[in-house]
Image (spheres, rainbow, N blue to C red):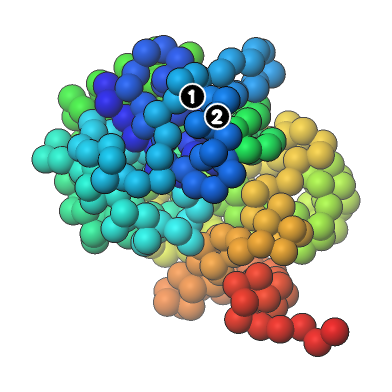
Amino acid sequence: MRIAVFGTGGVGGNFGGLLARVGHDVAFIARGEHLQAMHQSGLKISTNEDEFVIQPVWATDDPVEIGEVDVVLVCVKAWQVEQAALAIRPMVGPDTMVVTLQNGVEAPEQLSQVLGPSHVLGGLCLTFSYIVEPGHVRAGGGSIQFGELDNRKSERVSKLREVFESTGVNVSVPEHIHAALWQKFLMINAFSGIGSITRAPAAVWRNLPETREMFEQVSQEVLAVAKAKHIPVAETAIDEAASLMDRVPSNFRASMQRDIMNGQRSELEFQNGAVVRFAQELGVAAPVNTFIYQSLLPLELQAQGKLEFPS
């Protein structure tokens, strides 16, 4: 299968590398020092089990060079999706599937508005992946889910599932893709928000009664918003998120937390900010998400260059 990875960070590098390893024709869209390192030394993937290098690697910063593909994996940050949708166009042919793999729940609609809903599959992944240094990605674990936006069973989704199964990745097609997206959203929104506001790794805030209670409150608010939007998220979603919270590595920090702590632009507007926005539109109370969002907003605006802190 001919596959393009748009955004070769931790997620894109990991899944793209695994696909290339088993023989698929994978093009990586990257930029800067990461792209240069890939050209010079290939793409190194380190997992808990092994380490391998894709070399030579097909990497570029220009989607036009790639042309039409069978699948585009969109692995950019949530705040980059609208711009990515326009850049992806040269790679989208009549039968191209475009799979969303970033945090949040708004990417499928954003991509559909630009590319047309017939091309878009809702998708999500659970993996602890990040760039160690230019040209080198580390990934811990990894699972992926995707499906048609109308939840129908399709031949193309079945074929894509087989492709990912060939890599050894845990892959599934949920009965309701939007419910699956919101279940992950419930989890990552809490991890990101609480981690960002405390600056603490998971082992600290999950074991402190006060912040563990905040996890429950934040998650209940997301569940209430999902219900108001008629998304059938399971009542067990919070317990499942808490179970995952207790299993992640003690030093785990969500990507939004890492970005905020490093003074970089983050996904705040598409995580806790999105909960606040949805809640206001639907008349649902979300006081804890609002507190987190408003408390982190000055740092987010500073990272975007929209606010200066006096020295």
In the image, taking residue 253 as reference, residue 42 lies left or right, namely left
Inspect this view and state whether residue 100 appears. no
**Name of the residue lying farthest toward the bottom:** 310
Where 82 falls versus 164 (above or below)?
below
The residue at the point 75 percent across, 54 percent down is 195
Inspect this view and state whether residue 195 appears. yes
Secondary structure of the residue carrying tag 1 is: helix
Q: Nearer the viewer, residue 106 or 290?
A: 106
Mark 2 Cα shell of 10 Å, populated few (<14), some (14-19), many (≥20): few
**Name of the residue lying farthest toward the front:** 40
Identify the amino acid type marked 2.
Gln
User: Disc 2, disc 1: CB below 8 Å?
Assistant: no
Identify the amino acid type marked 1.
Gly
Secondary structure of the residue carrying tag 2 is: helix
**Residue 248 pos. (x, y %):** 73, 34
In the image, taking residue 174 as reference, residue 133 lies left or right, namely right
**Residue 109 pos. (x, y %):** 31, 57
Where 128 falls versus 187 (above or below)?
above
Placement of the N terminus among the 4 image quadrants: top left
The residue at the point 71 percent across, 52 percent down is 258
The residue at the point 77 percent across, 83 percent down is 309
Would you name the residue on which mark 1 appears? 17
In the image, taking residue 108 as reference, residue 133 lies left or right, namely right
Where 57 falls versus 93 (above or below)?
above
Would you name the residue on which mark 2 appears? 40
Q: How far apart are marks 2 and 1 (CA)?
A: 16 Å
